Image (tube, grey):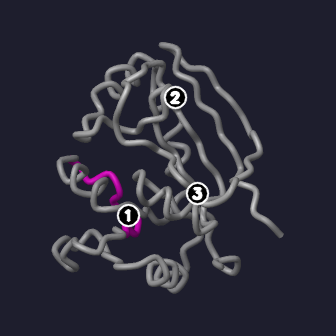
Amino acid sequence: MYADRPFKSAVFIGISLDGFIAREDGDLGWLTSRGEAAGGDLGYDEFISGIDAVVMGRGTYEPGLTYDPWPHEGRHTAVLSTTLEAGADPRVTVYRDLDTLVRGLAERGTKSVYVDGGQVIRTFLRAGLIDEITLTTVPVLIGTGLPLFGPAGRDVPLTHLSTKVFGAGVVQSAYAVEHPA
């Protein structure tokens, strides 16, 4: 459906061993407390240096408003939301649907997209818009929370690219998403 898009999309996200990206209330304490013990930025700075646009949903955008400084300065930041007021934040562009978002990114000349937030990641994955996934797994079972993955409507074959082990038992694996020809 989006085979002719001019950009590549990547996921770079932390998860619990049982596959959650946050607690049900959005809390990330289980992630941040262990992430520091792992040592360093776990490759995030290198990853983000090659990104020119960030796409997220409202559920990821709103908690990010507390960050000072704004973490996406200098990058086009798109929020995929049917409810967020367009124009309320001059740092972001709000898109109401995936087709308009993809068209907007293409018109901007976007080459590399960081896809962040569970719902948006799942939407991009179902649409065949994810090219690479980097999962940083923190050795904790939180039991319940916001899952990274859900029904995809089909198998999504992956090719393992690399695995790194950091301190505190944190493991990071990168995968290329195989797209049907």
Q: CA distance from mark 3 to mark 1?
A: 32 Å
Q: Is residue 104 left or right of residue 145?
A: right
Which is more toward the observer, 17 or 115? 17
Considering only vertical position in the picture, is 144 above or below 126? above
Amino acid type for the residue under numbered disc 2: Thr
Amino acid of disc 1:
Gly
Which residue appears at 19% of the width and 70% of the height?
Answer: 89
| Image position of 144 with respect to 130: above or below | above
Residue at 32% across, 75% down: 93
State which quarter of the image contains the N terminus: bottom right
- Find numbered disc 2 in the image and state the secondary structure of the residue it sits on: strand
User: Mark 2 and mark 3: span between their CA atoms?
Assistant: 21 Å
The image shows residue 82 at horizontal and vertical percentages of 29, 75
Q: Is residue 77 magenta?
A: yes
Q: Earlier in the sequence, mark 2 or mark 1?
A: 1
Magenta stretch, main secondary structure, is loop
Residue at which label 3 appears = 152
Tag nearer the camera, 2 or 3: 3
Which residue has dot 2 on it?
A: 137
Q: Which dot marks residue 74? A: 1
Discs 2/1, front: 2
Q: Quick one: 11 or 22, which is closer to the camera?
A: 22
Part of the protein shown in magenta: 68-78
Q: Under tag 3, what secondary structure?
A: loop
109 displayed left or right of 94 = right
Q: Quadrant of the C terminus?
A: bottom right
Q: On residue 144, which mark appears?
A: none
Which is nearer the N-term, disc 3 or disc 1? 1
